[in-house]
Amino acid sequence: MEIKTYPAGKTALYGYEAPGKTKAVILLVHGLGEHAGRYAGWASMFNALGVTVRAFDLPGHGNSEGRRGVVPSPEKVYDTIDRLCDELYSEFPGVPLFIYGHSLGGGIVLNYLVRRKPRLSGAIATSPWLYLTETPPQAKVIMANLAKKLMPGMTQPSGLKTEFLSRDPEVVAAYRSDPLVHGLISAGLYGWMTDAAKETLAGAGEINIPLLLVHGRNDMITSSSGSLQVAGLAPKATLKLWDDGYHELHNDLLREEHFEFIAEWIDSLI
């Protein structure tokens, strides 16, 4: 892990390198409250196939600076992604570059595609945050909407029900005991993702790179309806719904099949 300063501040970077020649590179964006270090095992599976994975901790998460659960303006985060992509193009000239986001990261990636229209070989969004499966209490939503303008840095508990992350109890236990995991979300971040979802759905028809959307039908954190809508609008989208899948498909009991599906999709493009 190394720390670099980007538009969003001091950012923790992770490199999961493929042995030998790299045939593709993935830039990974993690979910709310977690950090990129949780993807080490997942990345190693890609490494074994010759795919290098790079990742970073979002502001207010993991080893990056910032108050827990507080993420600056979306433009600063997207500027950071742009910088990282430029660095990867320089480091791996001519090698296909993919961006991959999970949950909050999936919502960020989809909105990034709509706003920035990057030159990438493809994008992957798993369990993207477009709609939540369970709507927060109305009073909490009203408070968040007021606070996003007046006090965007005000944080509240995210209300994440960790038992719904995976059907593997060891994954849930590890998440709960991870000192770098937090359970906070700022009013500004909640407002950003709510607005971003609307913008993404309005502009999904303009996503002109190959896009893989994957969701579990039993995801009780983010709703698969958002993935279905984007898949119906984006011209080069592929949609995969796993019948029994929970939220963290990469950590669920079907992780092997999920990995093979993603790997085959990447291979079809390179």
Image (cartoon, grey):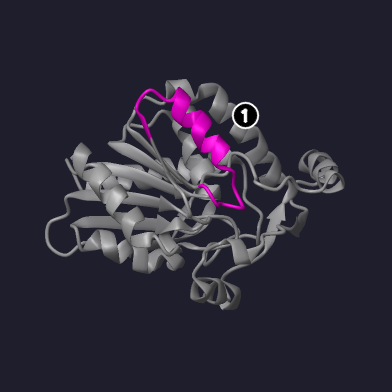
The residue depicted at 38 percent of the width and 63 percent of the height is: 14
Residue 63 higher or lower than 103, as above or below: below
Q: Residues within 10 Å of mark 1 (few under 14, many from 20)?
A: some
Left or right side of 41 for 206: right
Q: Quadrant of residue 146?
A: top right
- Does residue 16 appear in the picture of this structure? no
Q: How many marks?
A: 1
Residue situated in front as seen by the camera: 262 or 33: 262
Q: Which percent across, then down, holds residue 116? A: 45, 30
Q: Residue furthest left?
A: 20
Q: Residue at x 16, y 50 (%)?
A: 23
Q: Is residue 74 left or right of residue 52?
A: right
Percent of width and height locating residue 83 = 39, 44
Question: In the image, what residue type sits under mark 1?
Answer: Lys
What secondary structure is found at the residue carrying circle 1? helix
Residue 65 lies, with reference to residue 86, above or below; the image says below
- Asked if residue 239 is positioned above or below residue 215 in the image, the reply reads above
Magenta-colored span: 217-238
Q: Quadrant of the C terminus?
A: top left
* Residue identified by numbered label 1: 198
Q: 44 and 215: which one is in front?
A: 215
The quarter of the picture where residue 235 lies is top left
As drawn, the residue found furthest toward the front would be 243
Q: Please state, as top left, top right, bottom left or bottom right, where the N terminus lies in the image.
A: bottom left
